Image (spheres, grey):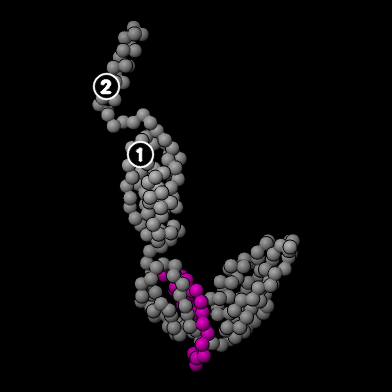
Amino acid sequence: AALSIALVLLVGGASYFILNPNQSSVTRILPNVVGLTEAQARQELAGLTITIQRAPDPRIPRDRVSSQLPLATIRVSEGSAVTLTISDGPGDATVPTGLLGKPLEEVRAALTAAGLRVSRTIAVDSEQEPGIVLKITPEPGSTVEAGTGVVLEIASGNISVPSLVGLNEIEARTILTQAGFLVKIVEAYDANQVIGIVLAQAPTAGEVKLIGSSVTITINKTQG
């Protein structure tokens, strides 16, 4: 009886592989190819059937793998299908229209909502109220890559210095630059505070200063 069962299993197994000639008994763990170029990913996935699709992705540089299916660490058979999505970059954004003559804060919010950022503000003499946006570059209505920096020309005058203490250096620099101030850095060390944060600022928050003037921030840095 045992011999009969063994024969049945042997015949059944042979029939399975005859009827399923493409079924591979060799398996492998999928490597993580996110961030690689298509050529690098294909090399890592040699022996698998690869399908390529493309899509915008603000996190992954153009022409790099932004996602893979199945996910990395999954065990698959040789010849299995793997779909790779290649990043087209962050995609496009349109510089909003209707912002000229608006206050800086309103314009900055609109640009952020559109997927853009303020890279620089330039104070110019004008009869407009201080902080009013006079010019936007690139031109409003133009199509640019999402994340592109926008340069704003704003009416010169006095505005309040923003509160910076407790922020990290990058945040503080960004806020000051976007507000139209120049940035000066001083280093100090306070063992009770997080490294890299703003310990002090001059002028203090809320003081009214001329757009384009300097604000000094003290950054917590280890000494030596």
Q: Report if residue 113 is visible in the image.
A: no
Q: Position of residue 54 (x, y in %)?
A: 34, 55
Instruction: Name the residue carrying label 2.
Output: 15
Q: Position of residue 102 (x, y in %)?
A: 46, 82
Confirm whether the magenta stretch covers residue 94: no
Q: For numbered disc 1, what is the local secondary structure?
A: loop
Q: Report if residue 45 is visible in the image.
A: yes
Instruction: Name the residue carrying label 1.
Output: 47
State the residue in front, 99 or 189.
Answer: 189
Q: Position of residue 8 (x, y in %)?
A: 30, 14
- The furthest residue to the top: 1
Task: Please give the label number shown on residue 150.
Answer: none
Q: Position of residue 35 (x, y in %)?
A: 44, 52
**Part of the protein shown in magenta:** 104-131
Residue at screen point 37% across, 59% down: 88
Question: In the rendered view, would you say 172 is above or below 133?
Answer: above
Confirm whether the magenta stretch covers residue 112: yes
> Is 12 on the left-hand or right-hand side of 116?
left
- The furthest residue to the left: 19
Question: In the rendered view, would you say 193 is above or below 154?
Answer: above
> Is 190 on the left-hand or right-hand side of 106?
right
Question: Which quarter of the picture shows residue 7?
Answer: top left
Question: Which quarter of the picture shows residue 172?
Answer: bottom right
Question: Which quarter of the picture shows residue 79?
Answer: top left
Q: Quadrant of the N terminus?
A: top left
Question: In the rendered view, would you say 28 is above or below 110?
Answer: above
State the residue in front, 159 or 24.
Answer: 24
- The furthest residue to the bottom: 127
First-in-chain label (1 vs 2): 2
Callout 2 amino acid:
Ser
Residue at screen point 44% across, 57% down: 60
Q: Quadrant of the C terminus?
A: bottom right
